[in-house]
Image (spheres, helix red, strand yellow):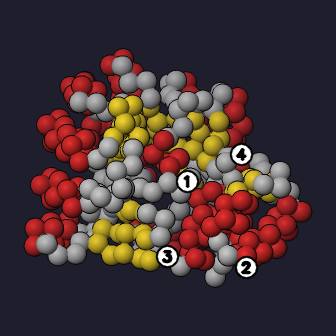
Amino acid sequence: MLKCIKLEIANRKDYLNNELIDTLYFGGGTPSILEKSEIKGILKHLHNTFNISTNAEITIECNPDDLTFDKLKALKKIGINRLSIGVQSFKDKDLEFMKRSHNANEAIDSIKLAQNIGFNNITIDLIYGLPNQSIADWEQNIEQAFDLDIQHLSAYALTVENKTILSQIVKKNKVKILSDNNVIKQFNILQNKAEEKGFIHYEISNFGKKGFFSKHNSGYWKSIHYLGIGPSAHSYNGHIRRSNISSNKKYIRNINLGLDYFEDEFLSESEQYNEYIYTSLRTIWGIDIDIIAKKYSYGVLSHFQNEISKWENKEFIISDKKKYTLTRSGKSFADMIASDLFIV
């Protein structure tokens, strides 16, 4: 696998046109299980192939139970400067429900250990809207997160995907998912507490202290071009979205045989516009009317102006006539508003 990843890196050296890269992200799956030498080898290959900033944000996703003293020391030594720790919850009952391999104490200990070793840019993930998750449980989760003095927090509402075990047990009434009103209530509690703690709600699911927004994700939301390497990875150059095949076996076979290991999707003008709307609306930077006027035809601009007005009237959107951003109440309905603005 590592050999094939390096081959793909070499094959795609011109994808970003030698632009300066200021973020590298090891994510998807559990990259923290790789040995120090393996991560170091990939980093070296990336630096030899692309124009990477000396101050690049280099993030690795990790599970709390992977983060031993030796592992953290090794990650820091080879240049990893940001940790994304998949905590999900500080409640053991939640972790058992989600089939996580760590417990709450291990999550807390992993964060403290990383801080003691010298990591000062740590983000964690939390999930809300879990079955049987009370308001008190969620408040305690948030309090615990902020008490650990992290720099960044990502929080996601539980979604029930079709053909998953969760969807099956929900259909059988073995668990009862929370009502939309309760999920929104938890989201509002999160917004209030984050603001109290000095965190900026810069994207629907993301909160960061000043100077600690995720460069990697911010680039995606601002429609900056990105390159993804490895199985299931995605890339986007403004016009074409590339998706690598998800099967590890097929990815390795096709790379070695020189066959296509990806699918390209050429985006129409309306699809490019929809992509811009979806990513931009979720952020504090919002939708820029000048960008729409410059990049798309007049019909697209006219459509946007016609559709956005009703959300302004409902006070879900606020504008300064140039930038359109969600209001506090509008953030709970971001996906619905974005889909309404889409061209279909």
Would you say residue 184 is visible in this rendering? no
Kind of residue sitting beneath label 4: Asn
The mark total stands at 4
User: Circle 3 is placed at which residue position?
Assistant: 267
**Image coords of residue 174 (percent x, y):** 50, 66
Name which residue lies at 67% across and 48% down: 285
Camera-side residue of 169 and 268: 268
Mark 4 vs mark 3, foreground winner is 3
User: Circle 4 is placed at which residue position?
Assistant: 188
- Picture quarter with the C terminus: bottom right
Question: Spatial distance from mark 4 to mark 3, Cα to Cα?
Answer: 35 Å
Question: Spatial distance from mark 1 to mark 4, Cα to Cα?
Answer: 22 Å
Kind of residue sitting beneath label 3: Leu
**Image coords of residue 91 (percent x, y):** 48, 39
Name which residue lies at 30% across and 68% down: 244
Do the numbered discs 4 and 3 sit on residues whose CB atoms are within 8 Å? Answer: no
- Picture quarter with the N terminus: bottom left
Crowdedness of circle 2 by 10 Å Cα count: few (<14), some, many (20+)? few
Q: Mark 4 or mark 2, which has the lower sequence index?
A: 4
User: Circle 1 is placed at which residue position?
Assistant: 221
User: Circle 2 is placed at which residue position?
Assistant: 299
Q: Is residue 246 above or below residue 109?
A: below
Q: Mark 1 or mark 4, which has the lower sequence index?
A: 4
Kind of residue sitting beneath label 1: Trp
**Where on the picture, by quarter, is residue 208?**
top right
Secondary structure of residue under mark 4: helix
Outermost residue to the right = 313
